[in-house]
Amino acid sequence: MIRHHVLPADADLQTRLGAFVRTCRHRLGASQEELAWRANIHRTYLADIERGKRNVTLRTVANLAKTLRITIGHLFAQVTAPGAVPELVPGEVRDILLVEHHVVAAAETARAFKRARLANPIKILRDGEAGLNYLFGTGRYARRKQVRPQLILLVPDLPRMSGAEFLRCVKADERTRDIPVVVLTISNRRRH
């Protein structure tokens, strides 16, 4: 089974995710056991996440966001830009842009989000150029207004434009630089 894993953008990302999850859990007044049960994950796995010692799957992130009563975009905004005030209206649901050229992996990601009952619609594009056109309302998307997804999920090995080049373009433009971007890798290992 192919699984997507979140790649830490820097050594501190896991620690920030853990701290944010712990803070949200405390605000809800939930124990680790209760949150783990509600999010359908093992308590020791949650403890590792809160300590910043664990990479997480998209399914886990989606389950945690839902259980913590926040949008997945808000969670990533807080983790990737600590201290920044995201432009998100609480409860606002916007598209999640998935830039993924492998049809099976894209479909699996969409199914994982559907199983997690995420309200965010997922827009799947197969390459970086199409992703930029979608974000900036150019090329094939020139007739529609510019969109602002809540989150961008990106694989590094895209055709025609690398994921790194796509990310540089997104972060270089003031209209899109504060959209949270999560870089994904593929792993064939099963979680034990």
Image (cartoon, rainbow, N blue to C red):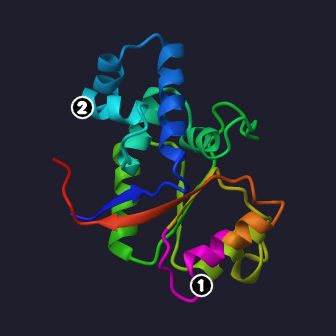
Instruction: Note whether residue 117 is visible.
Output: no
Q: Which mark is residue 123?
A: none
- Amino acid type, label 1: Met
- Establish if 2 lies above or below 140: above
Main SS, magenta residues: loop
Q: Which residue is mark 1?
A: 161
User: x and y percent of residue 177 in the render?
Assistant: 75, 58
Please indicate whether residue 34 sits to the left or right of residue 96 in the image. left
Residue 162 within the segment the image draws in magenta: yes
Residue type pointed to by label 2: His
Residue at 32% x, 17% y is 34
Question: What residue lies at 49% left-to-right and 15% top-to-bottom?
Answer: 26
Range of residues picked out in magenta: 155-167
At which x and y percent is residue 6? 44, 55
From the viewer's perspective, tell me whether residue 177 is left or right of residue 39.
right
Look at the picture and state if 43 lies above or below 111.
Answer: above
Whole-number angstrom distance, CA of label 1 to CA of label 2: 38 Å
Residue that label 2 marks: 42
